[in-house]
Image (cartoon, coloured by chain):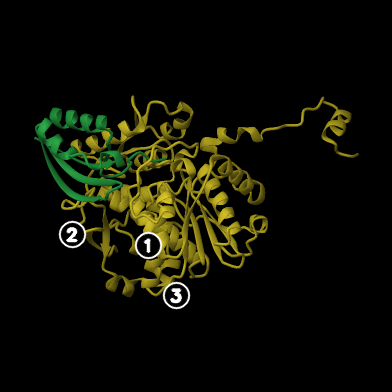
Chain colours: A yellow, B green
Amino acid sequence: MSFATGLRCRKCGQEYPLQPLKVCDFCLSPVEVNYDYKAMIQAVSRQSIASGPATIWRYRDLLPVETKDEIDLGTGMTPLVKADNLGWKLGLERLYIKNDCLTPTYSFKDRAVAVAVNKAKEFGFNTVACASTGNLAASVAAHAAKAGMRAYVFVPSNVEPGKLVGVSIYKPNLVTVEGSYDDVNRLCAEVAQKYNWGFININLRPYYAEGSKTLGYEVAEQLGWQSPDCVVAPAASGLLFTRIWKGLQELSMLKLIEPVNTHMYLTQATGSSPIVKAYEAGSLHIHPVTPNTIVTSIAIGNPADGYYALMVARQSGGGAQDVNDEEAIEGMKLLAETEGIFAEAAGGVVIAGLRKLVQSGKIHKDQLTVAFITGAGPRTQEIVSDVVQPVKVEPNLKSFSEVAGVGV
Amino acid sequence: MAKKQVMFTFPHNLIKEPIIYLLSHKFEVVTNIRRADVTENRGWVVLELEGKDKEIDAGIAWVIEKGVRVDPIEGDIIEG
């Protein structure tokens, strides 16, 4: 059963019943799900979780979903890989990769969308919607297909059609908007206000957010019920980063792991790094920027949870690191060449950021470090198309031996 | 009457300008500030605008033209 009791404003503390709600009515700040942790601690144990399915629904008691017959694509329990080859290259003895390329639609968004779509169904919506250029759109469209719901996906008209194949295959209503990213943002805010839809990252955002906590739960469980020394994760809106932290904190509160002493490091692409800039400036204000980076999956100039991500980085004794586009590409290649994992560019940002954090002495070689790879590479593979450098030979052995330099 | 909730982010050179006051005088828009943080160097204000759609849209266009960044309060909605 769910122990969710209501929604609570993260700024002013105003409480609301569980309902579709985008922000606090009073101070217009984000709201989040509140739980009855006293009751939860009586019901949840390591054994009860371990006896659940090998999906995010093993953590059902820690999520705000009531239904027993949930819409499920099989998301969760993705591999936590000991990355010795990459660790050796970077100078880390205990490096792990949480590989969320391996979800039903190839990104961590499936975790968040699974919870949001189930809540949408519970609230009686028959239509879900989102604005996205890739990962979120695919996940929403796939879950809506499974749920038998209508889906509307809004994209700027300049997005390459090739990027939308992995979305359109699930047959959502694809809407291209003539205008900039800002125009799409404004339109979607108005659409969400006018239509009685479950807009995944607007009025369903408090629930959408909770799905990402499962990344924190899984890592702790897969490490034998312990929290890592360091976490390195990408930050776009900042939501994922804050929810990994919340997941670890909740497990500690439920006495499933020891008190958390994890240093949380967020990474961003330099061309869209408002949180890193605020961290470096010692500011609490995230100044919006206009993104200019090839790392489109985390290119958010005005991050809704930026302030909270900044606070987690500070309070945990972690930090924030940016890398430029070239470094991100190098990170993608390094991860693929050493660990056999083809991540999207955001994964390259994480690996390149991790490298910088080690080089600057912030992360030490003996610290148990988990790098979060949150999306797979094939959706945007054109950005590394230069890796295709075949050896051309004539169709005979002599040519092959000569050109390829392979001795007989 | 429509309502729109937005965030204004002011650049340094506009901090001393009474933009919100002028907005409510030039256009038939009621402004209701909910949260704000303004210093001598920078500032942001989260506020609700109430009025006819046409007036709100024209008012926002004027504010943008003055050099203020205007965002939905939800932050960027479009995600990767």
Instruction: Give the spatial CA distance, label 3 vs label 2.
Output: 31 Å
Please tell me if label 1 and label 2 are on a single chain: yes
* Crowd band around label 3 with a 10 angstrom C-alpha radius: few (<14), some (14–19), many (20+): some
Q: Position of residue A160 (x, y in %)?
A: 46, 27
In the rendered image, residue A391, in percent from the top left (x then y), is placed at: 76, 31
**Which residue is depicted at the point 33% across and 39% down?**
A130
Q: Chain of mark 1?
A: A
Q: Nearer the viewer, residue A188 or A293?
A: A293
Residues indicated by labels 3 and 2 sit on the same polypeptide chain: yes
Q: Position of residue A305 (x, y in %)?
A: 34, 51
Left or right: residue A362 versus residue B17 is right
Which kind of residue does numbered mark 2 sit on? Answer: Gln
Chain bearing tag 2 is: A
Task: Categorize mark 2 by other alpha carbons within 10 Å: few (<14), some (14-19), many (20+).
Answer: some
A3 sits left or right of A46 in the view = left
Q: Secondary structure at mark 3?
A: loop
Q: Determine which residue is flagged by label 1.
A: A246
Mark 3 sits on what residue? A258
Q: Chain of mark 3?
A: A
Label 1, secondary structure: give it. Answer: helix
Q: Position of residue B71 (x, y in %)?
A: 28, 39
Cα separation between marks 3 and 1:
14 Å
Q: Quadrant of residue A400?
A: top right
- Give whichever of B19, A249 is nearer the camera: B19
Residue A58 visible to an observer of this rendering = no
Q: Looking at the picture, which amino acid does disc 1 mark?
A: Lys
Give the answer, above or below, for where A228 lies relative to A171.
Answer: below
Quadrant of the drawing holding the N terminus of chain A = bottom left
Report which residue position mark 2 lands on. A14
